[in-house]
Image: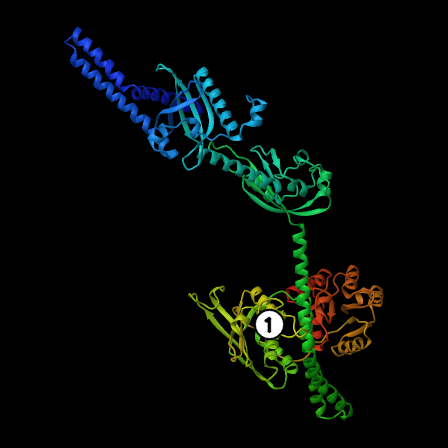
């Protein structure tokens, strides 16, 4: 349709131009003819002068109108005749645009021929020349003659066909090339035929077409060579095209094989995602593609095997201008290797964190040995005095009390060491920070040089946060170890502050990443040399350390930062050269629950009945037997799971409870509990463990264990545990707060 309109416009313009040419070429002749005719008419009919004057004015107005159109048309217009040889002659008329576009004055351009403004490529053929001419004539003359021959052929064609359209290139005065489309017409209104050429500048259109072709080629290249798998579907979800990367990801030999795979309803896409796709949404979903299963189901023709993690995006391309669907685009990326790398990285980080904790234990070995010696000294000393004291001595009870106190200190120290060595920390729960802080400072005292003074300042009334003790231990140990290292050459003072504060919602806050609220601040200050600003910017980077090789992993402060972020807190440091350093760890506070007063340590809970105690350590079994007898029970001791199962199965109803160690040869306590409960489901079984990670609370509950009891055994704890469970159903025991956790 557009082409037809263009032809109509060009034809109209040509007619107008023909009229203009007639007016331009023969203005005087026309006037003379008009004058002669007027004279004859005056002689014949003297009554018609007014009518003639009106006609003359009208003709002049039309001529002026045509000249205006000729000069202001949007295309270049050229008029020329023919030479005697049939070649294009000099221009007899050109419009203003032709002069301006080619850069010539009107008088200069009217003295030129079409051959002088046309850019002619090298001749395609050399027909029309003799061998002698080709051998003797210069190349320039051969090219010029060839141009004239081609121009003559074009003129003959225009004369024969009346109208010819062709592409050409015009040269400006400065040598610029202008691509044009020329519509040439023969004009027969004059004694000799003339040629009217209308040249349309197509530079912008050619540039746009070239840019479009290049854009389309880039799109094709991107589609073909993209590392992403790409497939295009029509509105009916029929496959239109797929690139090689997508075929490779799915292991399909070609497009026809891939077409059997339906990404919109495939069984590896979760049901919620399939529903969203069906509703026309754009969906991104990572799927675990089992190629063996897909091949077995007939859902895909593939040469690939095993599993792959595919990040798949199904894009709805929307509607066109007529509200019809434009189809769908599928993008797929194979992220299998990335997922494996991420999993390996997580495992490495886990192992590195564990190694860092164990390094902290190694650092504290001297302090732990010092504390153990301090604990063993009263135990051994008072025990020896008990042996030599008369049975009626008044000091015997005091000696035993001191031994018990030292034993409890040893138990607490073991629990602290186990907290550090656990590979998986306990789940977060409300804990108090003050006791942990004090425990760490006691441990640090033995590992820091004697010229470092440790002081703590507890200013917080509420110190309850949601965390686990391992995390707070690691924060304190790393900060205190760093402070001690900074002061190791000259000594100094290590100050630890525990304060609470309210973070207000104001601009310029030091912790903009934290929500307003109540927070607990742990501050560790040293009197060391301090740090430069450039160093402060990197101290929390993993593996960055200023310590000599072999003295640090560079993970201490990174661990502190990671734990603080995990607990939704923050870390900051105040330091300057020569002014020491103060590290602040800010953690969100919990509203402290109203605690119940600790129970008074009155008389021990006693009971009756036979209790089966199982432990492969003879010393532990002998001590437990005496404890049970002291509490009023009839103890029966077994040295292992097999012996205990034989005794239990001989008379299941004999026992009021079973207390067993977890770690034993051949069979664990939890496994033994399962076999006992299969014989008698209502028997209370208490599981003892010296290392909580050998059995989780969930596994213990699943095995039917009523409660976990930590070693070393304390008689009061054993008495209270038996009291809670003997004679009570498992459900009622759980409601009383004795869930194994």
Give how far across and how far down residue 714 sits, in percent. 71, 77
- The residue closer to the viewer here, 584 or 548, is 548
Q: What residue did someone put label 1 on?
A: 475
Number of on-image labels: 1
Considering every residue shown, the one lying at the far top of the view is 44
Give how far across and how far down residue 332 sits, in percent. 62, 44
Question: SS for tag 1?
Answer: helix
Q: Would residue 740 be seen by someone viewing this image from the given angle?
A: no
Up-down: is 270 above or below 489?
above
Give how far across and how far down residue 290 sits, in percent. 70, 44
Quarter location, residue 238: top right
| Quarter of the image that includes the C terminus | bottom right
Crowding around mark 1 (Cα neighbors within 10 Å: few <14, some 14 to 19, many 20+) is many
Q: Image check: 107 left or right of 53?
A: right
Up-down: is 529 above or below 215?
below
| Quarter of the image that includes the N terminus | top left
- The residue closer to the viewer here, 275 or 41, is 41
Quarter location, residue 44: top left
Q: Would residue 306 be seen by someone viewing this image from the given angle?
A: yes
- The residue closer to the viewer here, 163 or 37, is 37
Up-down: is 303 above or below 473?
above
Give how far across and how far down residue 79 sits, in percent. 37, 23
- The residue closer to the viewer here, 78 or 400, is 78
């Amino acid at each position: 349709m557009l082409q037809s309109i263009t032809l109509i416009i060009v034809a109209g313009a040509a007619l107008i131009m023909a009229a203009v040419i007639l007016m331009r070429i023969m203005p005087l002749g026309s006037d003379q003819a008009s004058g002669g005719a007027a004279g004859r008419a005056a002689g014949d009919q003297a009554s018609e002068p007014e009518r003639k004057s009106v006609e003359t004015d009208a003709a002049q107005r039309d001529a002026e109108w045509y000249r205006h159109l000729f000069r202001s048309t949007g295309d270049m217009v050229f008029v020329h005749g023919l030479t005697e040889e049939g070649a294009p002659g000099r221009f007899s008329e050109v419009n203003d645009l032709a002069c301006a576009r080619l850069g010539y004055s009107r008088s200069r351009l009217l003295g030129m021929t079409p051959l002088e403004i046309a850019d002619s490529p090298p001749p395609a053929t050399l027909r029309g020349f003799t061998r002698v001419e080709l051998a003797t004539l210069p190349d320039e003359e051969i090219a010029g003659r060839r141009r004239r021959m081609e121009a003559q052929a074009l003129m003959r064609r225009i004369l024969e066909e009346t109208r010819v359209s062709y592409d050409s290139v015009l040269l400006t005065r400065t040598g610029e090339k202008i691509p044009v489309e020329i519509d040439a017409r023969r004009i027969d209104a004059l004694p000799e035929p003339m040629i009217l050429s209308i040249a349309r500048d197509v530079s912008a259109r050619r540039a746009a077409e070239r840019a479009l072709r290049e854009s389309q080629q880039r799109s094709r290249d991107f589609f073909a060579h993209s590392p992403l798998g790409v497939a295009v579907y029509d509105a009916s979800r029929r496959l239109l095209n797929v690139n090689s990367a997508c075929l490779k990801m799915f292991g399909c030999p070609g497009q026809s094989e891939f077409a059997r795979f339906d990404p919109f309803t495939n069984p590896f896409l979760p049901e919620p995602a399939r529903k969203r796709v069906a509703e026309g949404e754009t969906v991104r979903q990572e799927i675990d593609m089992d190629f063996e299963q897909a091949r077995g189901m007939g859902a895909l023709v593939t040469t690939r095997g095993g599993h792959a993690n595919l990040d798949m995006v199904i894009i709805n391309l929307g509607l066109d201008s007529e509200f019809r669907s434009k189809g769908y685009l599928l993008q797929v990326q194979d992220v299998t290797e990335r997922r494996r790398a991420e999993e390996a990285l997580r495992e490495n980080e886990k192992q590195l964190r564990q190694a860092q904790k164990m390094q902290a234990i190694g650092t504290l070995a001297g302090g732990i040995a010092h504390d153990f010696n301090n604990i063993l000294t009263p135990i051994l000393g008072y025990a020896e005095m008990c042996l030599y004291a008369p049975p009626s001595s008044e000091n015997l009870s005091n000696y035993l009390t001191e031994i018990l106190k030292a034993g409890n200190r040893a138990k607490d120290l073991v629990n602290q060491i186990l907290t550090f060595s656990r590979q998986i920390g306990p789940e977060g729960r409300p804990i108090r920070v003050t006791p942990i802080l004090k425990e760490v400072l006691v441990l640090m005292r033995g590992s820091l040089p004697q010229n470092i003074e440790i002081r703590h300042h507890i200013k917080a009334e509420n110190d309850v946060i949601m965390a686990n003790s391992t995390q707070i231990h690691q924060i304190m140990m790393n900060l205190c170890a760093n402070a001690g290292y900074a002061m190791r050459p000259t000594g100094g003072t290590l100050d630890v502050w525990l304060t609470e504060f309210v973070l207000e919602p104001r601009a310029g806050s030091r912790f903009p990443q934290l929500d307003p609220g109540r927070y607990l601040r742990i501050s560790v200050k040293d009197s060391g040399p301090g740090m430069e600003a450039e160093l402060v910017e990197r101290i929390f980077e993993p593996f960055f350390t200023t310590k000599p090789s072999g003295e640090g992993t560079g993970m201490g402060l990174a661990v502190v930062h990671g734990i603080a972020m995990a607990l939704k807190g923050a870390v900051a440091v105040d330091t300057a050269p020569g002014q020491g350093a103060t590290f602040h760890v800010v953690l969100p506070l919990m509203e402290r629950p109203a605690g119940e007063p600790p129970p008074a340590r009155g008389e021990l809970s006693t009971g009756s009945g036979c209790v089966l105690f199982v432990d492969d350590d003879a010393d532990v079994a002998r001590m437990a037997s005496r404890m049970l007898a002291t509490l009023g029970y009839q103890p029966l001791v077994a040295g292992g799971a097999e012996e205990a199962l034989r005794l239990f199965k001989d008379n299941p109803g004999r026992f009021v409870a079973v207390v067993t160690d977890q770690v034993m040869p051949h069979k664990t306590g939890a496994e033994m509990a399962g076999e006992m409960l299969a014989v008698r489901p209502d028997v209370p079984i208490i599981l003892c463990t010296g290392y909580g990670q050998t059995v989780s609370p969930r596994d213990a509950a699943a095995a039917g264990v009523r409660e976990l009891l930590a070693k070393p055994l304390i008689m009061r704890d054993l008495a209270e545990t038996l009291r809670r469970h003997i004679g009570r159903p498992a459900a009622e025991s759980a409601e009383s707060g004795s869930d194994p956790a």
